[in-house]
Image (cartoon, grey):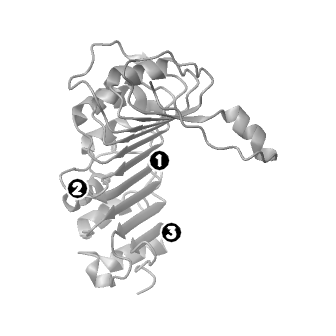
Amino acid sequence: MPKVEMPRNRGKKGPDSKQRHREKTVFSLKAMARPSPSPWSQLTALKTENLAVTDFLHVLRGCPRLRKCTVYTYAGEHEPPAFPVLVHSALEELHLSHVMGQFVHCLELPSLRTLSLGGAISNATHFLPFLARSAASLREFVFRRYGVAQVEGPPLQWFHIRENIVSVKLDDLPDETSRPFLLALDRTVDMGFLPRLRSLHINCDTHRVDAAVVHALQSRYTECDGAKLEVLRLVRIFYDRIHWDRMGEIDWDSLWDLGRSGMDIHVGSPEKNFLWDW
């Protein structure tokens, strides 16, 4: 049977108690011996752990009002189940951590606004048809590697079908992935790559921001007729006390000019912005 965890209510009354009642309870499901009927038709948030694809889809069918779902790890089938696509119209946030692509192979989420992927995401090809079905409403994409060395960043082709996304955060990105992503922002080369992007956060061990990358960034702000990239964060992770010359190959002068023109730029450690504070 699934394990159900309910947050404690200490009996306090106040303006947030009604909100908790409206939002119902956040449930946590762990691996099920067999699918069981879900009595939570009013549920709006759910966390699952170590569920097979079939059980996961079964749970979603029983939660038609679910708006936020977090999935940890994966158990069960190694191939996508032969199910028709399940359309869940209410789900707005999906967080996947250390799961396989099969979890989304049979899903269509027309209201999805936030997609977060973390850790070892295998069988990534299954995400492409899912994104094609669910990307129209997507506004925020987050990727976290969680220090798993063999995990690569998300393929660039994923972002060509996300026309409405406005915020991207790539955390612990492999060094060899960050620069190609920045170069792909060049609107003089490709107008279809994240055309409405306004906020970009990239956290990795080193950054390479040369003249070509700066040109791509300029095409998103000073030479831009459409949506502007307003916020740029390039952070070196794992180092709170580093010197500016340890950040990597960076064209500081050109970035400084871009910042002076109005783009909100942070380049440095999580705590220190070397663009303005040497």
The residue under label 1 is 166
Residue name at image x 22 percent, y 56 percent: 177
Residue 275 position (above or below residue 103): below
User: Which structural element holds mark 2?
Assistant: helix
**Which sits earlier in the primary sequence, circle 1 or circle 3?**
1
Q: Residue at horizontal 40%, vertical 54%?
A: 169
Residue 86 is situated, as x and y percent measured from the top left of the image, at: 41, 17
Disc number lying in front (1 or 3): 1
Q: Nearer the viewer, mark 2 or mark 3?
A: 2
Amino acid type of the residue that numbered disc 1 sits on in the rendered structure? Val
Circle nearer the N terminus (2, 3): 2
Q: Quadrant of residue 52?
A: top left
Amino acid type shown at disc 3: Gly
Choose between 43 and 93: the one closer to the eye.
43
Whether residue 81 is situated above or below residue 209 in the rendered picture: above
| Rendering coords of residue 95 (x, y %) | 43, 40
Whole-percent x, y for residue 102 in the image = 28, 27
| Residue named by callout 3 | 262
Tag on residue 107?
A: none
User: Distance between the Cα atoms at labels 1 and 3?
Assistant: 18 Å
What quarter of the picture does the C terminus occupy? bottom left
Using the image as rendered, state which of residue 10 and residue 182 is in the foreground: 10
The residue carrying pointer 1 sits among few (fewer than 14), some (14 to 19) or many (20 or more) residues within 10 Å by Cα, namely many
Query: Which residue carries the number 2 mark?
Result: 177
